Amino acid sequence: MAEPKRRTSRPKKSAGRFTDDERAAMRDRVREQKIVWGKDRAADERAVLAKISALPEPDRSMGLRLHSMVTAAAPALSPRLWYGMPAYTKDGDVLCFFQPACRFGARYGTFGFNDGARLDDGEIWATSFALHGLSPEGEERIAALVRKAVR
């Protein structure tokens, strides 16, 4: 019997070892924990925009568009960095975040929600959305989910 083919699109990870991308995310998280987020909203937003501006295209354009959408749809959310990614908090807890494709070598970025978003819809619902572009319909869908998450 022939062995099934293995996926080769991602680098193989040795048991008990982290990839370079995972180690970078952990280093980002340690640095972020030293920052007092929420004390100065303008400084927090500058940090998020600086991180987005440092992204390669098309992640940069998508990150800037998402930042504008989230801040317009839910002005009460506070921007911050979370594992080196742009995120938005409610009462200090990360509610939603943008994971750029370049972050972990993925073929698309994602916009995700943590369980505090309470997007519950029956027995199953999506908490993360693949982004290969942002059409007006996609932008409105994300904005509606952000508004629902803040309630």
Image (cartoon, rainbow, N blue to C red):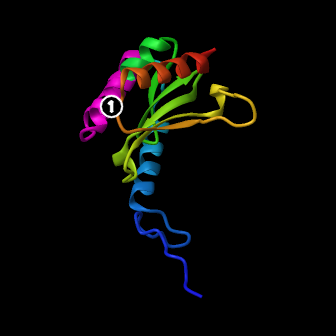
Residue 147 in sight from this viewpoint:
yes
Main secondary structure type of the part rendered in magenta:
helix
Quarter of the figure that contains the N terminus: bottom right
Residue 38 in sight from this viewpoint:
no
Quarter of the figure that contains the C terminus: top right
Q: Which residue lies furthest to the bottom in this view?
A: 1
From the viewer's perspective, is residue 145 above or below residue 132? above
Considering the numbered disc 1 on the image, is that residue within a helix, a strand or a loop? helix
The boundaries of the magenta stretch are: 41-66
From the viewer's perspective, is residue 104 above or below residue 134? below
Foreground residue among 93 and 98: 98
Q: Position of residue 47 (x, y in %)?
A: 34, 28
Residue 11: in magenta span: no
Tag 1: residue type? Met
**Which residue corresponds to mark 1?**
62
- Residue drawn at x 47%, y 43% is 29
Q: Which residue lies furthest to the front in this view?
A: 1
Q: Position of residue 4 (x, y in %)?
A: 54, 77
